[in-house]
Image (tube, grey):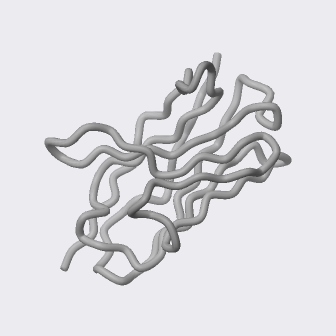
Amino acid sequence: QVQLVESGGGLVQAGESLRLSCVVSGIIFRDNAMGWYRQAPGKQRELVATITSGGSTDYGDSMKGRFTISRDNAKKTVFLQMNSLKVEDTGVYYCAARRVAGRYVYWGQGTQVTVSS
């Protein structure tokens, strides 16, 4: 059984930082790409960041320069460091694992991030 458990969300003010974590079990973590997505109220889910098994990263346009995705294969954990948070970063952040044909197969339950002005 594959499980992805996110943590680290919360309420912060604009300009502050948060670090999200996602602990993965049930797959060979080191062999799989991992991603973070988010969904704001009334909007579609969008890409935040991805990291391949080899450590290559990619980011959504509005996150570049502010967010950093990383992974610790020994701890089977993927991180998302979010700096200079903006009100528009508010949403539910989802961890995703195992990318097949461009789509992620497994998803976590999500963690809420709220940025106030």
Q: Residue at x 37, y 74 (%)?
A: 85
Residue 108 on image: x %, y %:
49, 34
Find residue 34 and report its horizontal and vertical position in percent: 64, 40
> Residue 82 at x, y = what percent?
49, 68
Residue that protrudes farthest toward the left in the picture:
42
At horizontal 14% and vertical 42% (from top left) the residue drawn is 42
- Image quarter (top left, top right, bottom left or bottom right) of the C terminus: bottom left
Circle count: 0
Farthest right residue? 74
Q: Is residue 1 above or below residue 109?
A: above
Q: Is residue 55 above or below residue 32?
A: below
Q: Quadrant of residue 44?
A: top left
Quadrant in the picture for the N terminus: top right
Which percent across, then down, holds residue 112? 33, 52
Residue at 60% across / 28% down in the picture?
A: 3
Compared across the picture, whether 52 is left or right of 90 comes to right
Residue at the image point whose x is 52% and y is 58% from the top: 20
Check the image and name the residue furthest to the front.
61
Left or right position of 80 against 33: left
| Residue 30 to residue 49: above or below | above
Q: Residue furthest top?
A: 1
